[in-house]
Amino acid sequence: MGIRFILMVNKQGQTRLAQYYEWLTLEERRALEGEIVRKCLARNDQQCSFVEHRNYKIIYRRYASLFFLVGVDNDEVSFHLFNYIMLLFYKILVSV
C-alpha cells in the first residue's frame, strides 16, 4: 500500500540514490533496479511516464541527466497518490 521505493538514476543507468520502504534482499534490489532502469531509459519523451513492471507501477520523471523513479503498488495509483508523487518530484527538483 503506497510508495514502495524511490530511485534516482543517471542516464548511464547507475543508481545514485535508492530508498526502499519494503524489505528486499540485495540481489532482488539489484535485479529490480536493473530491469526498471532499462525500461525507463529506453522510452522516449513522447511516451507516458507510467510503466508497469511486475506488481509495481513506476512513475518516473527526467530532469537534466537524472531520472527520478517512484514505485507504487500496481493497484494503488490514485489521483491523490499521483499528486503526492508530483509534489515530491517538484520538491526534489527545486532543491537540486
Image: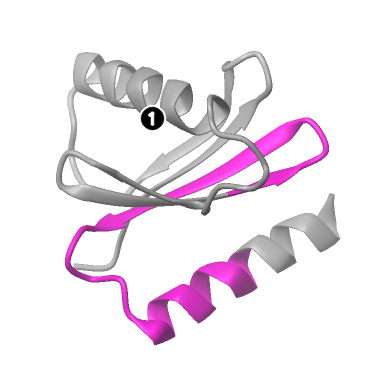
Q: Residue furthest bottom?
A: 80
The residue that appears at 56% across and 47% down in the rendered structure is: 47
The residue that appears at 56% across and 27% down in the rendered structure is: 41
Q: Is residue 20 above or below residue 14?
A: below
Frontmost residue, 33 versus 27: 33
Please indicate whether residue 20 sits to the left or right of residue 93 in the image: left
Quadrant holding the N terminus: bottom left
Q: Quadrant of residue 95?
A: bottom right
Q: Quadrant of residue 74?
A: bottom left
The residue that appears at 27% across and 17% down in the rendered structure is: 31
Please indicate whether residue 39 sits to the left or right of residue 64 in the image: left
Q: At numbered mark 1, what does the secondary structure look like: helix, strand or loop?
A: helix
Please indicate whether residue 51 sits to the left or right of residue 60 in the image: left
Q: Is residue 68 above or below residue 4?
A: above
Count of numbered circles in the view: 1
Residue 23 image point, x, y percent: 18, 39
Chain part drawn in magenta: 61-88
Residue 18 image point, x, y percent: 47, 35
Q: Is residue 33 above or below residue 76?
A: above
Please indicate whether residue 54 sits to the left or right of residue 88 in the image: left
Reading the image, the residue beneath label 1 is 36
Amino acid type shown at disc 1? Ile
Q: Quadrant of residue 53?
A: top left
